[in-house]
Image: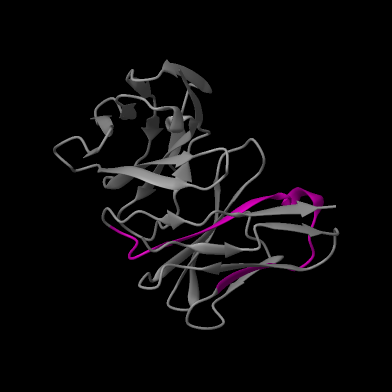
Amino acid sequence: EPEVTQTPSHQVTQMGQEVILRCVPISNHLYFYWYRQILGQKVEFLVSFYNNEISEKSEIFDDQFSVERPDGSNFTLKIRSTKLEDSAMYFCASSTQTGGNQPQHFGDGTRLSIL
Amino acid sequence: AQKITQTQPGMFVQEKEAVTLDCTYDTSDPSYGLFWYKQPSSGEMIFLIYQGSYDQQNATEGRYSLNFQKARKSANLVISASQLGDSAMYFCAMRDLEGSGYALNFGKGTSLLVTP
């Protein structure tokens, strides 16, 4: 069964450094998402992306964050200057469409640790 | 604004028994979808089941069923014949099905432990 692939599985970065989290969505999916989950807390929406542009973003997704689909397969989340509070599990998800009963399929996540 | 509430931080169930995980929600959207996801200790998020607000019948997927009571705004997950591998965090989530609401809004989750 096709799946969403995220790399790396664990990223350790010094505070203030830039980090890029990578995702390969399911190949026929058109809508892409990033979520984060701070340890012990609920999953929070960051951003959705369709047709090469952001379609929705949350208050968490400030100017430090950006997303990009640099080619036909990858979808990246960049954090420009990481802060301690950015430490979390980051999930990429994709879906065939936003409406109806189409679920968002999640990757295994990237655990980001900021030192 | 949407709100998802999962009031059970932790649940225990004996293997082969059925268990119900509670989820209540609040929304002003007339059309919405409700989802359940499973998160094992390894961390991945696994989609389990979906219920649309206008669906006439409760959703079922194998051992998972959704007890949807629209008037009470509840969408409880029922797992029948529990297995040890069902031990995980379970998250209820919802989204608007109209307009531009793309985001899944998650509850805080319920930790389920299945005992032998």
Question: Could one spot residue B53 in this view of the protein?
Answer: yes
Q: Quadrant of residue B57?
A: top left
Q: Tell me where residue A77 appears, x and y as whole percent.
A: 62, 67
* Colour setting: one colour
The residue under the point 36% across, 21% down is: B19
- Quarter holding the N terminus of chain A is bottom left
Determine whether, in the image, residue A39 is placed left or right of residue B98. Answer: right
Pick whichever, A68 or B90, lies toward us.
B90
Along the line of sight, which residue is nearer the eye, A52 or A91? A91
The span shown in magenta is A75-99
Q: Is residue B58 left or right of residue B76?
A: left
Position of residue A107 relative to residue B85, above or below, is: below
Q: Magenta span has A44?
A: no
Counting from the top left corner in percent of width and height, residue B108 is at: 53, 33
Q: Residue at x 24, y 27 (%)?
A: B71
On the picture, is B88 further left or further right than B75? right
Residue A72 place in picture, x, y as percent = 47, 82
Q: Looking at this view, name the residue that lies furthest to the front.
A: B116
Per the image, is A79 magenta?
yes
| Outermost residue toward the left in this view | B56
**Can you see residue B34?**
no
> Is A60 drawn above or below residue A28 in the view shown?
above
Q: For the point 38% across and 33% down, which residue is it?
A: B25
Q: Quadrant of residue B4?
A: top left
Please state the total of marks drawn on the protein image: 0
| As drawn, B67 above or below A81 | above
